[in-house]
Image (cartoon, coloured by chain):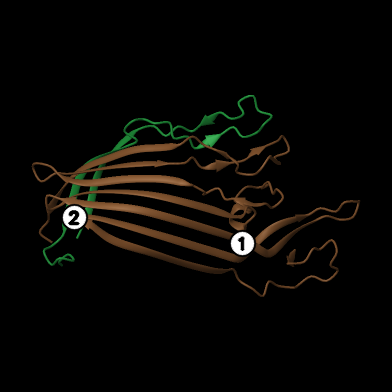
Chain colours: A green, B brown
Amino acid sequence: MKGKNGKGHHIRLGAYTLNVTDHGNFSTVYNNVASPNFGKFVGFLYRHEGLIIDFAD
Amino acid sequence: MYTGSLNPLVSPVLPAEPGTTPRNVTWNAGVVRELRKNLQAELTYLDSHTNRLFVVQLFTASSEAQSFMGLTNTGSSHDREFEATVHYTFQDRDQVNGSYVWSETRGDLNGLSNVFIPFAAPVIRPNVYGILPSDVPDRFIAWGIFALPWQLTFSPLVDVHSGFPYSAIDVEQQYVGTPNSRRFPTFFSFDMKVYREFRIPF
């Protein structure tokens, strides 16, 4: 079996990191005006790393 | 109950079934121009308009008469998007791309997919035509692919965009002010990956 370019398949190995700067990209907010925390953002997505194992043409 | 485009508070006879489906018209146009060798610019505009969307409407009687929650087919949404992209290639396989996107997303907030979520007792507020939760007016993305020694490839990506909108609500879960008029802080993410490809014998 050959890949799209007719030269067989490839496997891609590597590493990745998302949100390198650890910027506070919040996903939730206290939006009830009666809450003492009204307007406060929470759900911070921290920096995280992972490995890449892709099977490619 | 299904009410079509009628108000059940004043219409004694309502349609038995929708008889319609949502309709969408989407069009886009763009130009691509090579500014100089290996540097390409692209401008595109996209417009998407959907009408006859099914929307949950609250029909509240002013007196002691019965109020209704009805399904209408009068909803609509309108997306507009303008994108400017530059693409630069160098040293055979290295490339850098940058893209700015301006967009505007408006529509009825009580669409079926927004209202009937898997909660035992969903909160259904009066329908409003306005800023949709997915609205992101300004977005800039830059990414690249660079060859490193030992056949490694380095690929960084920067994504900066306006925060998503949200609504303030009161203790009865009703809107306070204009729905989706507030926004999360600006989103910023710098991501990167390093990888190498290996040929496999099959």
Q: Which mark is residue A39?
A: none
Quadrant in which residue B141 is drawn: top left
Task: Specify which label sits upstream in the sequence, 2 or 1.
Answer: 2
Quadrant in which residue B29 is drawn: bottom left
Going by the image, does A7 lie left or right of A20? left
What quarter of the picture does the C terminus of chain B occupy?
Answer: bottom left
> Mark 1: which amino acid?
Ser
Quadrant in which residue A49 is drawn: top left
Reading the image, the residue beneath label 2 is: B38
User: Residue B61: x percent and y percent?
Assistant: 85, 53
User: Residue B4: x percent and y percent?
Assistant: 72, 68
Q: Nearer the viewer, residue B111 or B156?
A: B156
Tell me the distance, in whole angstroms, between the alpha carbons under discs 2 and 1.
Answer: 42 Å
> Mark 2: which amino acid?
Asn
Reading the image, the residue beneath label 1 is: B76
Question: Numbered disc 2: what chain?
Answer: B
Q: Secondary structure at mark 2?
A: loop
Q: Nearer the viewer, residue B74 or B105?
A: B105
User: Residue B153: x percent and y percent?
Assistant: 17, 45
Going by the image, does B144 lie left or right of B93? right
User: Residue B170: x percent and y percent?
Assistant: 70, 35
- Specify whether disc 2 shares its chain with disc 1: yes
Question: Numbered disc 1: what chain?
Answer: B
- Give me the residue at 69% from left, 57% from top: B56
- Give me the residue at 66% from left, 43% from top: B178
Q: How many marks?
A: 2
Going by the image, does B137 lie left or right of B16? left
Q: Nearer the viewer, residue B133 or B196?
A: B133
- Residue lying at the far bottom of the rendered structure: B19
